[in-house]
Image (spheres, rainbow, N blue to C red):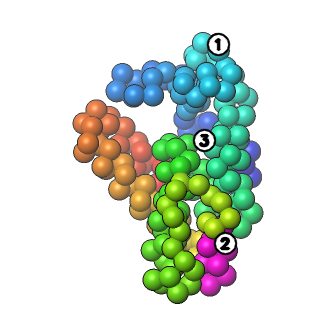
Amino acid sequence: MTVDAMIDALIAREGGYVNHPADRGGPTCWGITQAVARAEGYDGPMATMPVDQAAAIYRTLYWQRPAFDRIGARAPALAAELFDTGVNMGPEIAAGFLQRALNALNRNGRDFPDLTRDGRVGAQTLAALDHFLATRGASGETVLCKAVDALQGERYLALAESRPANEAFVYGWLANRLD
């Protein structure tokens, strides 16, 4: 799946303008919060934010900046999972999930050294991913996607437990964000 197709699918799933009272993100359009839109230069009404503005934000902030595009060149399904997770939880959380999963799957450091879980995809994370994929083959990407999904699901439940207002969203998160 191309990044354009991922962004189109995400925008379709997120829908247009929403201002749910339980959402700490406040007004959103196409899944983009008002704070993010303003930080990226959009100063119009959130209800009428152009879809191409949202797509540009997704491409820059949630695909290129966190280096998920570099993961996509190695493991496209994993990159798509990280992109979607990053949009919903923040790219640093998604990258941290990847680092945590790679650490758990490195056979106690025999395959590659543990990564510092800093939430950034840099040279060490990419090298660990390359080594993991070379060692585990085609099934490795599938296993990493499952690990990221598991961590994401656990975080959704924890968010609902820590803030009861999040229960308004947890069903949809689990239904629409986990594969």
Identified at 57% across, 16% down, the residue is: 47
Q: Are marks 1 and 3 in contact (CB under 8 Å)?
A: no
Q: Is residue 128 above or below residue 175?
A: below
Residue 134 in the magenta stretch? The answer is yes
Q: CA distance from mark 2 to mark 3?
A: 29 Å
Q: Three-letter amino acid code at disc 2? A: Ala
Above-or-below relation of 53 to 109: above
In this picture, residue 2 sits left or right of residue 35 = right
Residue underneath mark 2: 127
Residue 134 image position (x, y, % from top left)? 67, 81
The Cα–Cα distance between marks 1 and 2, rounded to whole angstroms, is 42 Å
Instruction: Using a 10 Å C-alpha cutoff, classify the residue at mark 2 as few (fewer than 14 neighbours), some (14 to 19) or many (20 or more).
Output: few
Residue range (magenta) = 126-138
**11 or 59: nearer the viewer:** 59
First in residue order: circle 1 vs circle 2: 1
To which residue does mark 3 refer? 10
> Residue visible at 54% across and 24% down?
35
* Label 3 packing within 10 angstroms: few (<14), some (14-19), many (20+): some
Task: Please provide percent x and percent y for residue 83.
Answer: 60, 50
